[in-house]
Amino acid sequence: MTNHWIDFRNSDCILIMGSNPAENHPVSFRWVMKAKDKGATVIHVDPRITRTSTKADIYTPLRSGTDIAFLGGMIKYIFENKKYFNDYVVNYTNASYIVGDKYGFKDGLFSGYDKEKRAYDASTWAFAMDENGLPKKDPTLQDARCVLQLMKQHYDRYDLETVSKITGTSKEDLLKVYEAYTATGTQDKAGTILYAMGWTQHTVGVQNIRTMSMIQLLLGNMGIAGGGVNALRGESNVQGSTDHGLLFHIWPGYLPTPTASLQTLAEYNKKFTPVSKDPMSANWWQNRPKYVVSFLKSLFGDAAKAENEFGYAWMPKCEDGKSYSWLDLFDMMYRKEFTGFFSWGQNPACSGANSNKTRAAMANLDWMVVVNLFDNETASFWKGPGMNPKKVKTEVFFLPCSAFMEKEGSISNSGRWAQWRYKAQNSPGDALPDGDIMVEIFKEIRALYAKPDKKAAFPDPILNLKFDYVKDGKFDPHAVAKAINGTFTQDVTIQDKTYKKGDPVPAFAMLKDDGSTSCGNWIYCQSYNADGNNMARRDKSDETGLGLYPKWSWCWPVNRRIIYNRASCDPMGRPWDPKRPLLEFVGEVKDGKYATQKWKGDVPDGPWYPMKNPDGTNHEGGKYPFIMKADGMGAIFGPGMKDGPFPEHYEPMECPVEKNLLSSQFTNPVATLFGTEKDVLKTCDPGFPFVGTTYRVTEHWQTGVLTRWLPWLIEAEPQMFVEMSEQLAKLKGVKNGEMVIVESPRGFLEAVAIVTKRFQPLIVHGNEVHQVGLPWHYGWIWPKDGGDSANLLTPSVGDPNTRIPETKAFMVNVRKKGA
Amino acid sequence: MAGKSFFIDTTRCTACRGCQIACKNWNQNKASETKNTGNHQNPPDLDANTFKLVRFSEVETDGKVAWYFFADQCRHCLIPPCKDTVEAHIADAVIQDEATGAVVYKEETKKVAAQFEDIRSSCPYDIPRKAVDGRLVKCTMCIDRVSNGLQPACVKICPTGAMNFGDREAMLELANERLGKLKEKYPKAQLIDANEVRVIYLVIDEPRKYHKSAIASAEQGLSRKVVLRRALKPAHGLLKGLMSS
């Protein structure tokens, strides 16, 4: 989230699309209701009426998988009705940049497409540069090749008629939503978007979010209180695990994982350290080498030296062009490309798309270690439906682990607050905290590598790893937190202040690339420094009155509560909206120029002067607001997506229509596809005529491994169900509460039919289209008649950027059980 | 007439069921093995282990679909007909706490187990249930929590401000203020039986669209008047009596 849950209350218009916060983030609705109390408009766009819709001022349905068409129509509306915030767009975004001659878009394909490789050559999307190496601009936004004009042209096709035919949303409802939301395109209004898996789990997932980010930039809603782009994270610490490099493509702190072709640190730094020739661009990632070296120091300690490039050679590298995401790993497992697997705190047999493929893949392993609180469908896959235990060779080890209240440590919530929490009670039986399990495993691994053994290939990274996180034989979360914050590795003097070797680094601006600092994760530098464990702070003071609570826990980066906040001020550093001041420049003025540097409010995105002086001249120390972009500008065009510089509507890989009404490119031309016999897709197949989607309920969490065993929760939502409209139920002869079979080209399951008015058929391309929805919280282990996972139905196809599966739009059939 | 009251603002309820679960947690009430019957409402009705139940109701008016949530519980009537019905058989089994106005069933209600159906039907809101050991059970207003300065468990847990609890006058004021705001947009908005109960629901549509027993029926209203006429005995159950039972 760019903002925070509490910040919803500052909004004038809350668009909830691709999420269902009342059910999946129940406490968030406290803040949505507070916004409503102050007169905010709440809009919910979703295939069905949910508990969220019941509190919305405007609810409208859409066909699952058509969000870009819906939002593309909003962009067209913004241009036609001049709703964009001109000063913001001109000063803070790349709308004025001139796009190079090689860029083009024709009938659904962008320039640079290679049909064989199913990939784009993104260099054709580059900006035109001037003689100083800066992008050419037209601040009047009139040049036909400037981003704004190209965008206008791109979305000109997204007229109400066409959008309505694609989405199934009525033209009246589209207009109602467009009008209400775009009213926030003024400097005294704030609009926010709350999204979640309803946007990410599509083959156009990233571009769904991009479309809204562009709208937020056009309306001047980024960086302000009550605005932003807010991804509602579903698991308490999913933000923290992403921050700390859980995913294959990043190291902690969003540093890219090196590939095999980058054999030296020098090559790595050259590739990943952006350069800007614009003195007004902070280009913060120019500091990347400092964070990389400090990270390597935290891994290898004294063994990391300048002469060995701080142990860079010891770090694992990805093969160039190869992906190691969830879908890829299970595809490799299915094709027997690896033989051992740790399933730690997860239940892939139910949680991953295309469960039959996932479950079959597990039978190809030699061994699997499952770390969890309860038995689950993964640990016991070998005795699950359709499995013959005698034929499964996989040896499964189960390690019981502690629940969250049985261990100490930090969690980072959706709003980037790292909050320390304490142990409430001991774990039962042999269960250990995850950290202790890791300590035990690493002890064994290191002992094995320390022996002279030919099989122990490449022992250096294992033997050189700095691993001083054990106190009294136990994993010590404080030691880890301090290493993450970072320490000086030698005595240093910085601006008259001397730090001793071992002292904590105060904040990331002091990290160095010479080995004098160690830091496990640069964005967490300051979280546990000389002031103590800042994550454990519990001071409720709130000077701005906006709910920033700067002394409650700690927020990355450098306790900044709303990121991109320099954009909440005009180029002279004055709040766009004086009634909602998040930040204000209060430096002294001499002769019409700012003479001293001082901001008031939130921690600014960098301490520099505003772009302009009060007399309108550029301040020579001023910086643009979007400091993480090399050019300092909010990127309406471009930023490195694999499927185009502008989002474009493509149909889901399985859909109920025969063509894409916006171009002859039917589906995302670079979507992630797999080729095993389990990867079956059927589009417009009369055998699978209904759109299926998956979701969650308040009462269960993820695959239900934790919640299915809690009697009060399973009492409230006891069984797998499928929701469908009364019209569809009539068509299929299904009565409310009856058992039905739901089947897709990949699998089938039994579910209780909930026949409801909350699903209504939509008119799509002139035809009636039915949608059905299923939760994915259930599994065959418990309860006995609870049903199985909705992911038996979902396809293993993914977004080309994130490789997240398209589990929100696929095709199914429904029939009465026994019929 | 003073004492405590709940104000339940259904327009803020998201049916997260935090109240339903918190109630079970505080009272350590067991779960039953339920089935999905084509509805999210579960358990399907109040029962001996469910004193608080979020009811889900789908209604269609002029083609517009609404989904109403009604966090049902004992209303702690100012003049409770159940108390009167029980007392027709046995004295001192139902307490009406002086300080809060909470209507609380004691162990002794076991002795009227055979009259359970009569007692249940005397309640305008269909609240009392019978436990396996014959006791009559229902919401206690968390009188143990409240008399120790805490909020009832269901109120404490509510994230949206749907569940409110406090001095009766303050609750009535809050309820009327909220009603005033909603009346403009929802002409059917009303407080249900506010002058007769300590659990005041705010709804924006006809109460029976939320739940068939959301409002006292006219018929029961009449019998209520009968009850009123004959039931003006002094309240004799005090908190002390309850705690020692």
Image (cartoon, rainbow, N blue to C red):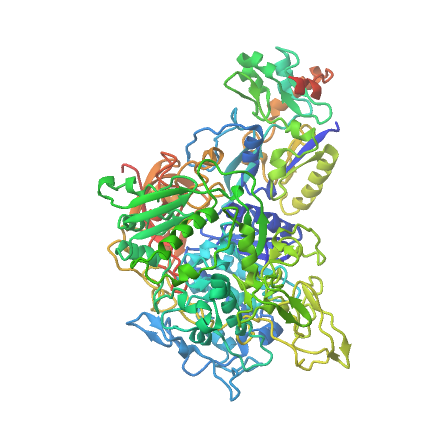
Answer with the quarter of the image where residue A460 lies.
bottom left
Instruction: Tell whether A628 sits left or right of A785.
Output: right
Q: Please state the horizontal and vertical placement of residue B78, each as a whole percent of the image.
A: 69, 25
* Residue toward you, B239 or B34: B239
For the C terminus of chain A, give its image quadrant: top left
Count of numbered marks: 0
* Residue toward you, A772 or A22: A22
Identify whether A690 is placed above or below A165: above
* Residue toward you, A609 or A23: A609
Identify whether B245 is placed above or below A10: above
Q: Tell me if residue A165 can be seen.
A: no
Residue occupying image coordinates x 56% and y 33%: B208
Residue occupying image coordinates x 40% and y 75%: A122
Q: Please state the horizontal and vertical placement of residue B207, each as a whole percent of the image.
A: 58, 35
Residue furthest front in the image:
A452
For the N terminus of chain A, give its image quadrant: bottom right
* Residue toward you, A551 or B130: A551
Answer with the quarter of the image where residue A451 lies.
bottom left
Residue furthest bottom in the image:
A131
Residue furthest top in the image:
B89
Residue occupying image coordinates x 47% and y 33%: A711
Answer with the quarter of the image where residue A107 lies.
bottom left
Q: Tell me if residue A619 can be seen.
A: yes
Q: Please state the horizontal and vertical placement of residue A477, each as a whole percent of the image.
A: 54, 50
Residue occupying image coordinates x 40% and y 45%: A371
Q: Please state the horizontal and vertical placement of residue A654, each as a whole percent of the image.
A: 33, 57
Instruction: Tell whether B166 sits left or right of B64.
Output: right
